[in-house]
Image (cartoon, rainbow, N blue to C red):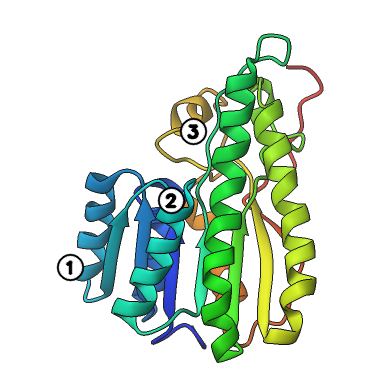
Amino acid sequence: MPGVKDRVAVVTGAANGLGREIALLLAREGARVALGDIDGAELERTAAAITKAGGTAVTLAGDLTEESGAARLIEVAAERLGGLDILINNVGGSRNRKVWEMSVEDWDFVLRLNLRPTFLCTRAAVPHMMRRRYGRIVCMSSGAREGTPWTAYYQGGAAYSAAKAGIHGFVRDTALELAEHGINVNAVAPGPIDTERAGPNLKRLNDTVDYSPNRMTPLIPALTSSRSSPTGSSHASARTTNRLGQP
């Protein structure tokens, strides 16, 4: 993977699901990886898998919706791994409620969880990348709401969809601000992925589509390589064109 070997990458939300898969992929290709998540025990499992395979990983368990947690993760990566080249903003989640049943607390929770870590980690990482005049930032969005069979089973996601739309806007503007500093910023919008959270519902679809996390991982090498040129773009992955007329 050109441009990833010997690079330093931070992956947030790396305790499980997509974050874990991305961290394992980058480490396999020679990146030194710093892992962040609130779930310390699962984070250590990811790190153990990386080191067992001969890779290098450091961990920091903490709340990345807080300034101190995000800043500390970036600081640990830069200090212990020798700088920072790649940031994967992957923290996210949802509390599903129909809009007329959703509390303000749930709405605020979902927007905070999906947007604040992306902003805070990017803000903390950018000065390190500016000093090198090099950086690759990938923000995980979602394509799961765009007319796939998943929609029939996964309703009540208005707050989640609003937050992920915010990711796309953040990427476009941040890419413009950072282009002159050699820093590319892009979004990846996976469709439904067979992770711990989504897997049980995906099995209800009873179709033949491959929902494994491996379907979206080819985009990560393409967007984090030193040869990568796109910036300010959203890239769809692991989406199906099978649409349902009725839920």
Left or right, 235 with reference to 118? right
Q: Amino acid at mark 3?
A: Ala
Identify the element where label 2 is drawn: loop
Report which residue position mark 2 lands on.
13
Q: Is residue 247 above or below residue 86?
A: above
- Residue 217 visible to the viewer: no
Q: Which residue shows up at 26% across the image and 47% down it?
A: 40
Identify the element where label 1 is drawn: helix
Image quadrant in which the C terminus is located: top right
Mark 3: few, some, or many residues within 10 Å (few <14, many ≥20)?
A: some
Residue furthest toward the front? 68
Task: State which tag comes first along the sequence, 1 or 2.
Answer: 2
Q: Which residue shows up at 51% across the image and 80% down it?
A: 128
**Label 3, label 1: how far apart the Cα atoms are:** 28 Å
Report which residue position mark 1 lands on.
52
Observer-nearest of 77 and 16: 77
Q: How many discs appear?
A: 3
Q: Amino acid at mark 1?
A: Lys
**Label 3, label 2: how far apart the Cα atoms are:** 15 Å
Q: Depth-wise, is mark 3 or mark 2 nearer the camera?
A: 2
Q: Is residue 100 above or below residue 155?
A: above
Report which residue position mark 3 lands on.
198
Observer-nearest of 70 and 92: 70
